[in-house]
Amino acid sequence: MFATVLKVVVEPGETVGPDDTLVILESMKMEIPATAGIGGTVVKVAVREGETVQVGDLLAVLE
């Protein structure tokens, strides 16, 4: 399944919790928040707004 990155919510250096949204994706006219899943610090955001991604693509790196 493919999705488009609508909005990047975090930036490098930001501290996030497991339920915090990293990016908002759009697929089949639905907005889908992609959450961190774990707590940590954002080291890198691997996608840009408007980019097309698919299942398994790296969205961000947490430390």
Image: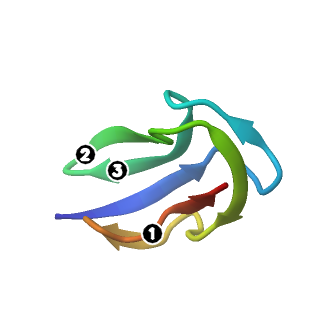
Residue 2 vertical position relative to residue 9 in the rendered view, above or below: below
Whether label 1 touches label 3, CB < 8 Å: no
Local secondary structure at mark 2: loop
Whether label 2 touches label 3, CB < 8 Å: yes
Q: Tell me residue 62's x, y (percent).
A: 62, 55
Q: Can you tell which quarter of the image residue 48 is in?
A: bottom right
Extreme residue toward the front, this view:
63
Q: Tell me residue 56's x, y (percent).
A: 29, 68
Mark 1 or mark 3: whose residue is earlier in sequence: 3
Q: Tell me residue 8's x, y (percent).
A: 61, 52
- As shown in the figure, which amino acid type bears the numbered disc 1? Leu
What residue is rendered at 36% in x and 70% in y? 53
Q: Is residue 38 left or right of residue 52?
A: right
Q: Nearer the viewer, mark 2 or mark 3?
A: 3
Question: Local crowd at mark 1 within 10 Å, few (<14), some, or many (≥20)?
Answer: few
Q: Which residue is mark 3?
A: 26
What residue is rendered at 79% in x and 44% in y? 14
Q: Nearer the viewer, mark 1 or mark 2?
A: 1
- As shown in the figure, which amino acid type bears the numbered disc 2? Lys
What residue is rendered at 70% in x and 53% in y? 42
Q: Which residue is mark 2?
A: 29
Local secondary structure at mark 1: loop
Residue 41 vertical position relative to residue 19 in the rendered view, above or below: below
- As shown in the figure, which amino acid type bears the numbered disc 3? Glu
Local secondary structure at mark 3: strand
Whether label 1 touches label 2, CB < 8 Å: no
Question: Local crowd at mark 2 within 10 Å, few (<14), some, or many (≥20)?
Answer: few
